[in-house]
Image (cartoon, helix red, strand yellow):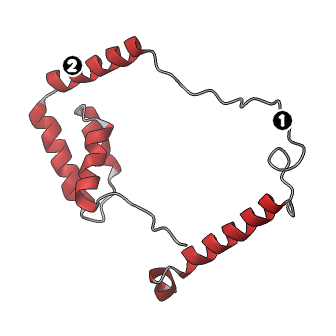
């Protein structure tokens, strides 16, 4: 099982299956209502893209700057250091995450600890 995972066998099977399915949809052999069957050519997309008001955005950025400037920097750094240490063990991380939040660490700072330790996941493309 491990060898199959390491060689990407499962990834390849999923990619192959998705490709075969997509070809069936595109050819019309497999009908998907609203995609390739019973499509209303005049229908407009219903999802709206969120556009944040620039004033609201600027106000939130300023609030974040203020929190960072007024928090206890040593306590925040210590909480992040403890999170880093605990993250390298089998300990439950929730108490450390909560302590970071209590010390006004941002989600970006908390996730930054993990990015520094392990990087970011990038799924390999299979063709």
The residue furthest right is 38
Which residue lies under the disc numbered 2?
66
Of 100 and 10, the residue lying toward us: 10
Q: Specify the quadrant that holds the C terminus.
A: bottom right
* Snapshot quadrant of residue 121: bottom left
Tell me whether circle 2 and circle 1 mark residues in contact (CB < 8 Å): no
Residue at coordinates 23% horizontally, 55% vertically from top-left? Answer: 116
Q: Which mark is residue 41?
A: 1
Residue at coordinates 54% horizontally, 25% vertically from top-left? Answer: 50
> Where is residue 20 shown, x and y percent of the image?
73, 70
Of 76 and 99, the residue lying toward us: 76
Residue at coordinates 80% horizontally, 65% vertically from top-left? Answer: 24
> Where is residue 57 shown, x and y percent of the image?
38, 19
Query: Is 35 displayed left or right of 48 in the figure?
Result: right
Q: How many marks?
A: 2
Query: Is 26 displayed left or right of 16 in the figure?
Result: right
Q: Nearer the viewer, mark 2 or mark 1?
A: 1
Mark 2 → mark 1, Cα distance in angstroms: 50 Å
> Where is residue 41 shown, x and y percent of the image?
83, 35
Give the vertical position of 66 relative to 116 (above or below): above
* Snapshot quadrant of residue 49: top right
Q: How crowded is the residue under tag 1: few (<14 C-alpha within 10 Å), some, or many (20+)? A: few
> Where is residue 74 shown, x and y percent of the image?
9, 36
Residue at coordinates 80% horizontally, 47% vertically from top-left? Answer: 35
Give the vertical position of 113 relative to 12 (above or below): above
Give the vertical position of 14 relative to 113 (above or below): below
SS at mark 2 in the image: helix
Q: How crowded is the residue under tag 2: few (<14 C-alpha within 10 Å), some, or many (20+)? A: few
């Amino acid at each position: 099982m491990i060898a199959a995972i390491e060689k990407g066998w499962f990834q390849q099977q999923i990619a192959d299956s998705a490709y075969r399915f997509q070809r069936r949809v595109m050819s019309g052999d497999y009908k998907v209502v609203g995609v390739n069957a019973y499509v209303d050519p005049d229908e407009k997309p219903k999802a709206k893209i969120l556009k944040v008001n620039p004033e609201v955005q600027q106000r939130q950025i300023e609030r974040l700057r203020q929190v960072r400037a007024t928090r206890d920097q040593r306590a925040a750094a210590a909480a992040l250091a403890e999170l880093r240490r605990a993250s390298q063990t089998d300990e439950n991380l929730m108490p450390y995450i909560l302590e970071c939040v209590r010390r006004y660490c941002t989600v970006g700072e908390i996730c930054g600890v993990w990015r520094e330790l392990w990087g970011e996941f990038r799924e390999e493309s299979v063709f």
